[in-house]
Image (cartoon, rainbow, N blue to C red):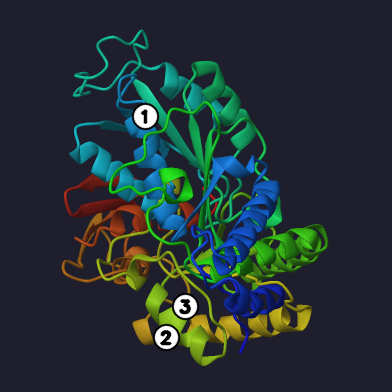
Amino acid sequence: MPYFDAASAAPLHPVARQALLAALDEGWADPARLHREGRRARLLLDAAREGAAEEVGCRPDELAFAPSGSRALHAGIAGALAGRRRVGRRLLVSAVEHSAVLHAAEAHTADGGTVTEIPVDRTGRVAPGDVAGALSADSPEGTDSTDSTDSTDSTDNALVCVQSANHEVGTVQPVAEIAEHCRTAEVPLLVDAAQSLAWGPVEGPWSLLAASAHKWGGPGGVGLLAVRKGVRFAPRPPLDERESGRMPGTVNLPAIVAAVAALRAVRAEAATEAERLHRLVDLIRARVPHLVPDTEVVGNPDERLPHLVTFSCLYTDGESLLHALDRAGYSVSSGSSCTSSTLTPSHVLRAMGVLTEGNVRVSLPRGTTSEEVAAFLGALPEAVRSVRDRLGAPAAEASYGGEQGVTSLTVDCLGRRCPVPVIELAKVIGDVPVGAVVTVLADDRAALLDIPAWCAMRGHEYVGSDGDAHRVRRRAPGA
């Protein structure tokens, strides 16, 4: 059964498996102890730290191991904000950051700080100029300046957070340019490199970096946090003496050894594997819109990860589509609102302003073959058709067949979830003449994104919304 969800967790690399088994025999002791077993464990830990630092591009004493990538992000953000508390309390994050960063931002707001969200374009890419503009902008109202009265920095900037590559759509961010703007403004930049570190080091003068081993074929439960020398950093309690005081608790040494072995292995084969997987993703990007009508491939077409592609299918819901593909033998992921317990759209897709319904993320692990991709492309149309048929999706947009004098129509979809409001809109758009307005009553939050996205894909005009009432004006084909 092909596994196409490497962006969530990559299969354990064979080198990691071997290293883990060896480290279980040699690295079980406490590396802080002075006896023979402790010294042996310490040698393993030091060697792992040196190997990881070499791949990250930092000094060994700048790198700490964390219990997870999310924990590394939380500790990095909290420590950097605390270290710069007397400078400012303004945190800047891109609108498409990982949820771990957004949760840390919420905690910062609850603690009296302020958060500025930097927008992205329709491909999910942050413009370096927008970062520079946000850094030079005045502090937003409500900034807590209690501890920054002695600072000469009128913008109150404490930290910028930008991922190196997006976890949902694969868009690679211009980190080096952003880092230069941050250096000019003398504000540290924290980079979430979880998705990109397997493919190469992060370029530019970044200040802090976090990553997670299970993204590159290491075992789960290992994260990395690098803090450059000279960065103001105050670890948050509870603290102890381990990992330079940045991560309390005894490290999982066997898992760390395996994680670093996997990182070195995937980096050694990264160039060859990236070129091969890039061709397979190119094939998926090119073929899906032809195989499945009313499908939108999202993310940056050029500046993207080599192994990841995301597309959204009209008139389907993400959960049903994932189940249909799973029954066909393919494990994929989704950013659709219909795959979450809260039924809210993916914040990444929402920030990009693209279609959220029927979203599918395909992320190919190392070793994926062209035959597996071809078989997936063969199974996808039937999976989508089965979901659309079950939901009663329209086969094609009908020509006007309504009564003369009809100038408007209302469709009541209150209480109904995605993609039903869009399906019902597509069914009735042919019942009004060109220029007439259809009002869709929908209280599903995804409708705010999916109805405008449907209009853009089908050439109709999204007039706007008034509460739960969404108005769409029918346009002639090609108008």
Earlier along the polypeptide chain: callout 1 or callout 3?
A: 1
Tell me which amino acid carries mark 1.
Gly
Tell me which amino acid carries mark 2.
Asp
* Residue under pointer 3: 395
* Residue under pointer 1: 83
| Residue at (63, 80) in percent of width and height | 21
C-alpha gap between disc 2 and disc 3: 9 Å
The 10 Å Cα crowd at callout 3, few under 14, some 14 to 19, many 20 or more, is few
Vertical side of 198 occupied by 112: above or below: above
Earlier along the polypeptide chain: callout 1 or callout 2?
A: 1
Number of the label disc, if any, that sits on residue 326: none
C-alpha gap between disc 1 and disc 3: 58 Å
Instruction: Check disc 3 and report its element: helix, strand or loop.
Output: loop
Number of the label disc, if any, that sits on residue 389: 2
The 10 Å Cα crowd at callout 1, few under 14, some 14 to 19, many 20 or more, is some
Residue 123 position in % (x across, y down): 55, 47
Quarter of the image with the N terminus in it: bottom right
Which residue is more in the foreground, 157 or 406? 157
Residue 329 position in % (x across, y down): 57, 90
Q: Residue 146 occupies which quadrant of the picture?
A: top left
Residue 437 visible in the shown view: yes
Residue 364 position in % (x across, y down): 65, 71
Q: Residue furthest right?
A: 272
| Residue at (63, 84) in percent of width and height | 2
| Residue at (55, 22) in percent of width and height | 183
Which residue is more in the foreground, 246 or 115? 246
Q: Is residue 235 left or right of residue 11?
A: left
Vertical side of 363 occupied by 51: above or below: above
